[in-house]
Image: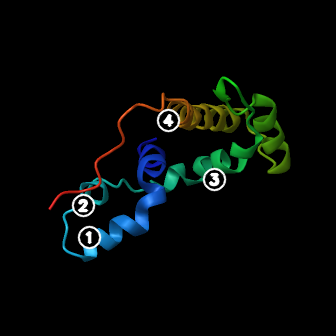
Amino acid sequence: MEVLAWDLQWGGKLEFLKTLQEQGQEVDALKSQPRLKPWVADYYRAFHALGSSRQIGMGGVGPIPISEIAAYFKIFEVHDLDERDTYITMIQALDSVYLKHMNKPPDQPKGRIGRR
């Protein structure tokens, strides 16, 4: 979940952050960048693959529908019930982080990029 939260906040600014660091600035965001643990990679890929299936409306971005997760299981032949349960738990946990970020009020402060 930490990797997704970091990516949502800083991922789009990664090249800029690296440029600042190359110029000798201390960049807190890069220091705190978490690494994706190998055991989470499959769930992270599934979450990103399913991201385009969510509804977007006047109330903001909606969650990934369970029907789309079920379709993912069929396409990628995930049959084991325990494995499906773990996928659902992980995808919904990642989705919760994503929804919180995407649906936050626009006046909330953004993260600090760095310091001299």
Sequence order check: which comes first, mark 2 or mark 3? 2
Q: CA distance from mark 3 to mark 4?
A: 19 Å
Circles 1 and 3, Cβ within 8 Å, touching? The answer is no
Q: Identify the mark at residue 101; answer none if there is no mark.
A: 4
Residue type at the position of mark 2: Val
Image point 33% across, 44% down: which residue? 111
- Direction bottom: furthest residue: 22
Q: Secondary structure at mark 1?
A: helix
Circles 1 and 2, Cβ within 8 Å, touching? The answer is yes
Q: How is the image coloured?
A: rainbow
Judge left or right: residue 102 versus residue 24: right
Image point 23% across, 76% down: which residue? 23
Circles 2 and 4, Cβ within 8 Å, touching? The answer is no
- Direction front: furthest residue: 107
Sequence order check: which comes first, mark 1 or mark 3? 1
Return the residue nearer the eye: 110 or 95.
Answer: 110
Q: Secondary structure at mark 3?
A: helix
Residue type at the position of mark 3: Arg
Image point 41% across, 53% down: which residue? 10
Whole-percent x and y of residue 58? 70, 25
Image point 61% across, 37% down: which residue? 91
Q: How would you rate the neighbour count of disc 3 (Cα within 10 Å): few for under 14, some for 14-19, many for 20 or more?
A: few
Sequence order check: which comes first, mark 2 or mark 4? 2
Q: How would you rate the neighbour count of disc 1 (Cα within 10 Å): few for under 14, some for 14-19, many for 20 or more?
A: some
